[in-house]
Amino acid sequence: MNKITDLIRTNFDETHHEYLRNDNDYLLAGVTSITGILNKPYLKPWAVKLCAEYAIANYEVGMNKTAFSAMITEAKKQHTVRLKEAGQTGTDMHAVLEEHVLARMSGNTDSLKIENEMQLYAYNQFLNWERDNNVKWRGCEMLIGDIDNEFAGRLDAVAEVDGTLTMIDFKTSNQISEEYHLQTAGYVAGLRWMAKQGMIKKVPAARLIIRLPKTLTKEVYDRKTKKYHTEPNELEIYPVKTDLEFDIETFLACRKVFKWRNQNLLKKD
């Protein structure tokens, strides 16, 4: 076998996606699902903040109990509403970058025609980075996996950046979370397994996260003050410099925890 698609297939729809082994329909854990088990201390204050803001904006003096209860119910949903909106924004931006990378790989040097003002704002910053760092794209939306450790995922891109083969992960979140270190390590672990099987010739030597802005400003949570503050939202280039071997070791430990928590879900009926 010389292709990962000989071993793994994907099922995608609007609500979820899954990776399955071709030989036995065994459900493989996704890289992002594995790192998703990590604690995210910033989410609780963010959700409470959205709830409070909605309640303050929609409270009316003299509201009866039924109306007040309905308003509070909606307030408690605001974090899921925002997450859904952010998810769609991220999906749309990923589609723009995928189209751009594929065009570059086919030899097209023209810039994309983008009408969405916010996407254009992010895309122009991305083009500047690409030009200034002599980027040569080598792969896009790559299926990766490790059958032995039972996980799979989809890597955004691989490129030579200033001569160094680099795996690249695109993000549109307001901040770069620590779990992304492990997510990128998971992709490298999958690529290493594929290299051992003869599916790819070379594993990227560097990890890079590119965070693209989806708004002109962003709210950032300060763990020391436990408060949010607003700052300009611009393209962020983040080389992952934590120890790769330790990151992979930790990712595989998370894989075991994920399996322990989902023992009855991984075998597809």
Image: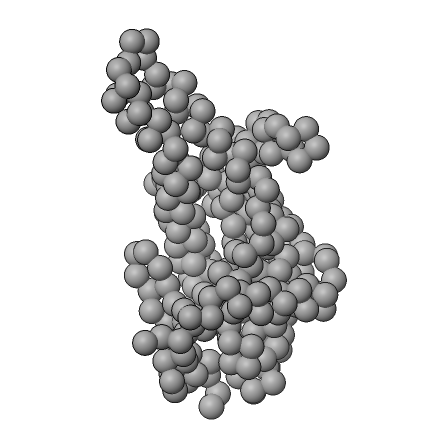
Residue 146, above or below 76: below
Residue visible at 38% across and 85% down? 24
Quarter holding the C terminus is bottom left
Residue found farthest to the bottom: 1
Counting the numbered discs, the total is 0
Residue 163 in sight here: no
| Left or right side of 165 for 211 | left
Residue found farthest to the right: 243
x, y percent for residue 184: 60, 62
| Left or right side of 1 for 253 | right
x, y percent for residue 22: 38, 83
x, y percent for residue 106: 43, 67
Residue 219 occupies which quadrant of the picture?
A: top right
Residue visible at 31% across and 20% down? 68
x, y percent for residue 252: 62, 69
Residue 258, above or below 61: below
| Left or right side of 5 for 184 | right
Residue 40 in sight here: yes
Residue visible at 61% across and 28% down? 227
Is 68 in front, or is 30?
68
Residue 202, above or below 64: below
Residue found farthest to the top: 61
Residue 220, above or below 41: above
Residue 191 occupies which quadrant of the picture?
A: bottom right
Is 154 in front, or is 106?
154
Residue visible at 58% across and 49% down? 39
